[in-house]
Image: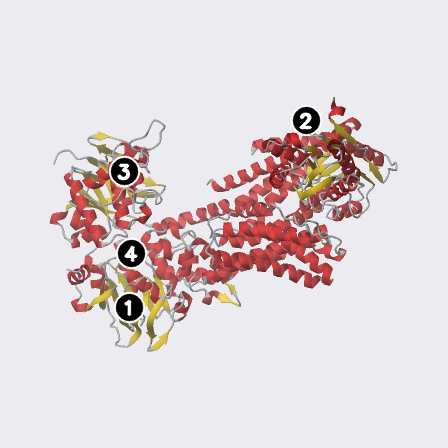
């Protein structure tokens, strides 16, 4: 047997197979869904609606990118929706108190990063599974948002604040531009820096990472901080979009976000996944929601159809 | 995939069949509550009668989702938007976008705190609370201990139903409100909270729920605790389950808001707007107190 | 000898373009232990998988007690009395010994289908007693040592009345004493007419316990031998098609007398006692001893990967602190851990990732990594180590054991190491890969690096190292220079003879 010569013949085919099972397959699925909706609704494939979709997807995508870091490193963050809510409240309150947008944004992002840091410290030093730590944080952060506001939304925010979530730059929604920026940054960090390589390594085999002289503790904590920061950005955009901080905002957001990441090809056991996959995963979910609304599929039925399409997408990716 | 395609295709055909007709978009806060289901049915009933198409999108009580859905309805180019807001503040940006797109907006049950709205259809929640209090006072002969199950904290409807009830009860110094806790308009939470209330109050004569769902939860827990006979339970909304409970003697009274009628009227208003007619800015749907006598 | 229990005649198997087995004959006689040998990729695992129904043969005959059979699947194999015990254990850690032994065929169930635990324990006790094993069947498997687990696995196989027992590298992770117990059990089984096929890279085990040996090379039968009339030289020749002298490539350079690293009263977490030793520049130093002697703990400690360390370490005469692996890396220390899958490799990640991960700095400009540089570095290291197949994008798990080990070593080559610590570097890999690793160790030492090998393979210690320290119960009991370090002497010292 001479494996080296055999390799030459199959390497190209193997490369394609790898691609097909990963991103290319998902692109095809997304294309099929989009073509279907284009046929079913004349309103779907218009530049106005496509831009609308990018705006609708932007929040899920931003939070999902944070989640990608956490899932890549082999952990999970269930507290993203609650962080988004409490950050929304914090941003709105500080905006009303100080009148300074910069200060309010810093307060919001800072709070998100801090909650993420607590998640990370408890997981790493407390040696508690992140599922439990962030499940507890899900309750704590949500409760904090409700207590803080006494359950009432914080409203009457200056309309200039609405630009972030609902405004446009030319024809392009501002939140789309923000999401695109976050995507590019995350792509570079995960693919072109040590941080990305180390994150992936720790998720793939934590002990081997430690014995490869990687500062495992630091990167694990950092992943939660990134997720907290991205959740905070998501929360700020939700608040800006509604010009109102809802203490109940982002309920169930974690499920949509985790679905997007897993649909994008990441493995819940860590080490495997890409931000491009996450982008596609978030797009698939967003396009399904939007398309069914345009077609006018009954709302009870929507949930079934969405569930089925997600299952088909995941199964199609798995079978080779 | 084929099956899904077929399903989507069928739904699409249904949508197309009415393409020539005028389309009304209805963004409803949640269809997990029978009150709003009844509202949706009223809308569908009237729309069919008038030859209009009604697209219903359910926000599942999420203001973010409602924002996206209103977006989609605007892109879908509906002729009139009827919105039942999840939150009166959070809906403002959606109403503004609809205004910008030149689509007339009607709101039902909860108002929008901004933007141009052609008509708001509401019930007077204070009056509903008042009617409930009158029924309670009558049943208790003006004397006894009462507990309250509140709706979602901060929701205007909950605040008004509370205020109307307490104001009216003020006329009866013999009635004492021993506790007032939130159960978020949910039957399950109503049952749980009532369990705790019954534990904490060995003597109790009445329970008032801001809606029937919570009142029915209270019925369940009261039966389980064997105290249903001592309790006068009053709710608001007059949903089918509540009417049945009143017939069975488990609940004493409810206040009928007529969501079916409310949405029928909203669709009629939409039709008028489409015909270029003027509509009233505010319409209050009349209320009706229902006890066992009315059902006989 | 009468009719063979199992006979394979002209077995042929192809996978796409690969001819994995060509016309292979093999027979298992009543009451014999038959070794199946060969380098990784020689076709051993394919043959085993055909025997256990995982793969199906393309051609040839398989006779079980004289009748031609076809094994449909692993369950069918078990039904026909063929049981296999693999390197990876199939025990369920959270269950008791008894529950594991009877998993799937519980002996006594009540009418409700529930298991009568007392009967289960009794039946297990009987089994354990038959094989002279002192073990409580109520004990949870996770509490047991590797050797005891392996024995439970064998008993589990025997509890289904297996006629043919396949043992694939059964001594992996076992201590010398446990290995001896295993062999005694095998001797006993032989008397009870249980027939065994024994797969191992350890030739000394083959000589100790096997009656005949069949060697596979490149998918063909390269000869079947009577072990009693056989010497290592012949066996290795058959496996490699070359001679034993080539297994250990000659050492050209000589170590300097200059001390590079010195440990004084050094004790890391898990070590019984503090130790003293020194390592010369350009030296290959072996530290040997049986499993449990504290070697691996010492290795982890020297790399800064233990939780606690006491005593002093001197690098070039200066005191150094090693609180973390990254500090050790900065001092030029590289470490290849004992368990390559659990501690060394990122199995699901590409070979390129594995080869670059420990030393990304050269591929970095202004904080950004160059994919091109990572690719070319992976190719260069891969070529230097003769990793086959060399596809940097391929996940490391697709490589054979020997090639995986080369990747773990290659991870550190970019670090221009001053000290290379290798813990059990050749465990479970084929002779060809071993030879290549020895050659690499020689060239590292020749280039001025110091190599510390911790191994329990005494032959390897004797043939590769300039100096050998023998460890027993946590302390060094002997120091042997190359001339005095024979396999026999090392083994005698290590085992306490």
Tell if the residue under mark 3 belongs to the same chain as the one under mark 1: yes
Q: Which secondary structure lies at badge 1?
A: loop
Which mark's residue is nearer the viewer, 2 or 4?
2
Q: Which secondary structure lies at badge 4?
A: helix
Asked whether A194 or A74 is in front, the reply is: A74
Query: Are the residues at dot 3 and dot 1 in contact (C-beta closer than 8 Å)?
Result: no
Residue B77 as seen in the image, left or right of residue C362? right
- Label 4 Cα crowd, 10 Å radius (few <14 / some 14-19 / many 20+): many
- Label 2 Cα crowd, 10 Å radius (few <14 / some 14-19 / many 20+): some
- Going from N to C along the chain, the mark reached first, 4 or 3, is 3
Which mark's residue is nearer the viewer, 2 or 3?
2
Which mark's residue is nearer the viewer, 4 or 3?
3
Tell if the residue under mark 2 belongs to the same chain as the one under mark 4: no
* Residue at mark 1: C274
* Residue at mark 3: C121
Asked whether C314 or A290 is in front, the reply is: C314
Q: Chain of mark 1?
A: C
* Residue at mark 2: B249
Asked whether C441 or B203 is in front, the reply is: B203
Q: In which quadrant of the rendered view does residue B228 lie?
A: top right
Q: Position of residue C95 (x, y in %)?
A: 34, 42
Which mark's residue is nearer the viewer, 3 or 1?
3
Residue B108 as seen in the image, left or right of residue C59? right
Q: Chain of mark 4?
A: C
What's the distance in space between the residues labelled 4 and 3, CA to CA? 45 Å
Residue at point 49%, 45% (across, down): A21
Which mark's residue is nearer the viewer, 2 or 1?
2
- Label 1 Cα crowd, 10 Å radius (few <14 / some 14-19 / many 20+): some
Q: In which quadrant of the rendered view does residue B230 lie?
A: top right
Q: Which secondary structure lies at badge 3?
A: helix
Tell if the residue under mark 2 belongs to the same chain as the one under mark 1: no
């Amino acid at each position: 047997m001479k494996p080296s010569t055999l390799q030459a013949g199959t390497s190209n085919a193997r490369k394609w197979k790898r691609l097909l099972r990963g991103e290319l397959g998902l692109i095809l699925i997304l294309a099929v869904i989009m073509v279907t909706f284009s046929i079913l609704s004349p309103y779907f494939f218009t530049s106005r609606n496509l831009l609308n979709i990018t705006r609708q997807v932007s929040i899920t995508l931003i939070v999902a990118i944070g989640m990608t870091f956490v899932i890549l490193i082999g952990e999970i963050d269930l507290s993203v929706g609650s962080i988004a809510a409490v950050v929304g409240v914090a941003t709105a309150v500080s905006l009303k108190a100080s009148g300074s947008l910069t200060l309010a944004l810093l307060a919001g992002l800072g709070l998100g990063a801090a909650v993420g840091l607590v998640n990370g410290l408890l997981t790493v030093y407390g040696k508690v599974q992140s599922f439990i730590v962030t499940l507890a944080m899900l309750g704590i952060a949500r409760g904090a948002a409700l207590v803080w506001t006494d359950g009432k939304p914080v409203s009457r925010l200056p309309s200039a604040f609405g630009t972030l979530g609902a405004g446009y730059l030319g024809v392009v929604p501002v939140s789309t531009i923000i999401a695109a920026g976050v995507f590019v940054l995350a792509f570079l960090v995960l693919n072109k820096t040590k941080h990305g390589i180390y994150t992936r390594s720790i998720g793939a085999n934590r002990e081997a990472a430690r014995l490869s002289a990687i500062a495992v503790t630091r990167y694990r904590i950092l992943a939660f901080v990134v997720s907290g920061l991205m959740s905070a950005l998501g929360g700020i955009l939700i608040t800006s979009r509604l010009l109102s901080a809802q203490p109940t905002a982002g309920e169930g957001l974690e499920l949509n976000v985790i679905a997007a990441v897993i649909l994008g090809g990441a493995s819940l056991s860590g080490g495997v996944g890409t931000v491009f996959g996450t982008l596609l995963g978030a797009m698939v979910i967003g396009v399904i929601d939007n398309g069914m609304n345009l077609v006018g599929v009954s709302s009870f039925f929507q949930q079934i159809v969405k569930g089925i399409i997600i299952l088909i997408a995941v199964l199609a990716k798995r079978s080779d | 995939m084929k099956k899904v395609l077929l399903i989507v295709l069928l739904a699409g055909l249904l949508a197309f069949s009415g393409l020539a007709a005028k389309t009304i978009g209805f963004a409803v806060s949640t269809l997990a509550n029978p009150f709003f289901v009844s509202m949706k049915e009223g809308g569908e009933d009237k729309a069919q009668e008038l030859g209009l198409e009604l697209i219903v999108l359910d926000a599942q009580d999420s203001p973010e989702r409602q924002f996206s859905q209103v977006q989609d309805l605007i892109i879908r180019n509906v002729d009139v938007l009827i919105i039942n807001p999840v939150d009166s503040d959070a809906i403002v940006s959606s109403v503004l976008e609809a205004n910008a797109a030149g689509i007339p907006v009607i709101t039902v049950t909860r108002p929008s705190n901004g933007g141009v709205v052609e008509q708001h259809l509401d019930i007077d929640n204070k009056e509903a609370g008042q009617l409930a209090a009158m029924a309670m006072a009558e049943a208790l002969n003006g004397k006894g201990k009462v507990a309250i199950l509140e709706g979602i904290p901060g929701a205007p409807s909950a605040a008004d139903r509370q205020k109307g009830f307490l104001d009216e009860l003020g006329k009866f110094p013999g009635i004492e409100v021993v506790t007032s806790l939130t159960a978020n308009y949910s039957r399950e939470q109503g049952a749980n909270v009532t369990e705790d209330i019954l534990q904490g109050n060995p003597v109790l004569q009445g329970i008032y729920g801001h809606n029937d769902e919570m009142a029915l939860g209270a019925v369940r827990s009261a039966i389980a605790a064997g105290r249903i006979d001592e309790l006068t339970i009053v709710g608001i909304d007059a949903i089918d389950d509540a009417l049945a409970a009143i017939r069975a003697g488990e609940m004493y009274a409810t206040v009928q808001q007529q969501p079916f009628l409310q949405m029928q009227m909203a669709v009629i208003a939409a039709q008028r707007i489409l015909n270029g007619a003027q509509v009233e800015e505010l319409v209050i749907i009349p209320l009706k107190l229902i006890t066992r006598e009315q059902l006989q | 000898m009468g009719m063979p229990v199992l006979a394979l005649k002209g077995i042929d198997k192809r996978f796409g373009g690969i001819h994995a087995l060509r016309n292979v004959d093999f027979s298992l006689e009543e009451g014999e232990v038959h070794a199946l040998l060969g380098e990784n990729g020689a076709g051993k695992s394919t043959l085993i998988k055909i025997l256990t129904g995982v793969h199906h043969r393309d051609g040839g005959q398989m006779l079980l007690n004289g009748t031609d059979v076809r094994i449909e699947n692993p369950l069918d194999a078990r039904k026909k009395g063929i049981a296999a015990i693999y390197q990876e254990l199939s025990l369920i850690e959270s269950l008791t010994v008894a529950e594991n032994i009877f998993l799937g065929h519980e002996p006594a169930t009540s009418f409700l289908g529930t298991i009568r635990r007392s009967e289960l324990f009794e039946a297990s006790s009987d089994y354990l007693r038959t094989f002279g094993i002192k073990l409580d069947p109520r004990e949870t498997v996770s509490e047991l040592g590797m050797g005891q687990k392996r024995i439970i696995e064998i008993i589990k196989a025997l509890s289904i009345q297996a006629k043919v027992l396949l043992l694939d590298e059964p001594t992996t992770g076992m201590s010398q004493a446990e290995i001896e117990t295993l062999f005694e059990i095998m001797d006993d089984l032989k008397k009870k007419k249980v027939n065994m096929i024994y797969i191992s890279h350890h030739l000394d085990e083959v000589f100790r316990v096997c009656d005949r040996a069949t060697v596979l090379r490149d998918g063909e039968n390269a000869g079947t031998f009577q072990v009693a009339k056989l010497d290592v030289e012949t066996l290795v020749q058959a496996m490699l098609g070359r001679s034993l002298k080539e297994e250990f490539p000659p050492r050209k350079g000589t170590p300097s007398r200059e001390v590079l690293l010195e440990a004084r009263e050094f004790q890391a977490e898990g070590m019984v006692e503090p130790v003293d030793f020194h390592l010369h520049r350009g030296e290959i130093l072996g530290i040997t001893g049986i499993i449990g002697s504290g070697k691996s703990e010492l290795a982890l400690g020297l790399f800064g990967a233990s939780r606690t360390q006491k005593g002093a370490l001197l690098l070039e005469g200066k005191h150094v602190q090693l609180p973390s692996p990254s500090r050790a890396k900065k001092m030029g220390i590289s470490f290849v851990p004992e368990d390559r899958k659990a501690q060394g490799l990122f199995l699901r990640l590409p070979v390129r990732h594995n080869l670059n991960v420990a030393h990304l700095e050269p591929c970095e400009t202004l904080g950004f990594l160059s994919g091109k540089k990572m690719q070319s570095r992976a190719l260069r290291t891969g070529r230097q180590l003769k990793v086959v197949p060399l596809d940097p994008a391929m996940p490391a798990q697709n490589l054979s054991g020997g090639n995986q080990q080369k990747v773990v070593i290659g991870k550190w080559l970019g670090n221009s190491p001053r000290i290379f610590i290798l813990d059990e570097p050749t465990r479970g890999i084929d002779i060809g890969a071993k030879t290549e690793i020895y050659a690499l160790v020689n060239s590292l030492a020749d280039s001025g690096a110091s190599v510390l090998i911790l191994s329990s393979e005494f032959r390897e210690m004797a043939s590769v190292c300039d100096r050998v320290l023998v460890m027993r119960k946590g302390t060094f009991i002997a120091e042997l220079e190359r001339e005095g370090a024979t396999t026999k002497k090392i083994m005698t010292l290590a085992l306490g003879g």
